[in-house]
Image (tube, helix red, strand yellow):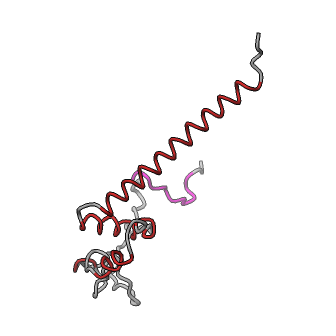
């Protein structure tokens, strides 16, 4: 009889690592193939969209792996989504955040808070004032 010592556990671990390694390798190959198809495919607008999306996220060099210098220069010269606007707003819309040096104007007189009279009970959530009368018998 053969004893199942260290050899069986080591083989299982190697099989698991090989499976993970092959899976990761296939995922990298699939991503590279998808990038190649997107950049060298028949659609120039798809190529510009993929490169623009990648550039916005800091992945421009990765998306430009399959593109020549001439293609990259041609995409940089084309006015599109990545071109800076002259007025600083996107598409002529008003900016979401406006920074000014002045304070906003006051909206009017402050509201006065009504205090309950001596005989009234305070509304729910308010604490009664301590007049010194409570707790004396």
Q: Is residue 19 left or right of residue 67?
A: right
Q: Nearer the viewer, residue 1 or 9?
A: 1
* In the image, residue 60 lies in the stretch drawn in magenta: no
Percent of width and height locating residue 65: 43, 66
User: How many numbered markers are drawn?
Assistant: 0
- Asked if residue 124 is among those painted magenta in the image, a careful observer would answer yes
Where is residue 99 shown, x and y percent of the image? 38, 84
**Residue 105 image point, x, y percent:** 33, 86
- Magenta region: 123-134
Q: Residue at x 77, y 21 (%)?
A: 5
Q: Position of residue 95 (x, y in %)?
A: 30, 78
Is 54 or 121 nearer to us in this picture?
A: 54
Residue at x 54%, y 60% (from the top left corner): 131
**In the image, farthest residue toward the bottom:** 101
Q: Quadrant of the N terminus?
A: top right
Q: Chief secondary structure of the magenta span?
A: loop
- Kindly indicate the quadrant of the structure image that contains residue 47: bottom left
Q: Is residue 49 left or right of residue 66?
A: left
Q: Is residue 38 visible?
A: yes
Residue 88, located in which quarter of the rendered image?
A: bottom left
Residue furthest to the top in view is 1
Question: Which residue is at 29% across, 82% downward?
Answer: 77
Residue 108 visible within the image: no
As drawn, 11 above or below 66: above
Q: What's the residue at 24%, 67% (across, down)?
A: 45
């Amino acid at each position: 009889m053969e004893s199942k010592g260290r050899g069986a556990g080591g083989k299982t671990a190697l099989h698991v690592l090989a499976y993970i390694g092959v899976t990761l390798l296939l995922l990298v190959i699939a991503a590279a193939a998808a990038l190649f198809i997107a950049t060298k495919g028949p659609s120039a607008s798809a190529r510009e969209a993929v490169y623009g999306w990648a550039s916005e996220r800091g992945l421009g060099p990765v998306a430009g792996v399959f593109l020549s210098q001439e293609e990259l220069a041609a995409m940089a010269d084309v006015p599109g989504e990545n071109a800076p606007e002259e007025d600083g707003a996107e598409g002529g819309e008003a900016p979401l955040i406006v920074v000014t040096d002045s304070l906003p104007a006051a909206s009017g007189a402050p509201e006065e808070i009504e205090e309950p009279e001596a005989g009234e009970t305070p509304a729910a959530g308010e604490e009664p004032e301590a007049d010194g009368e409570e707790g004396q018998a």
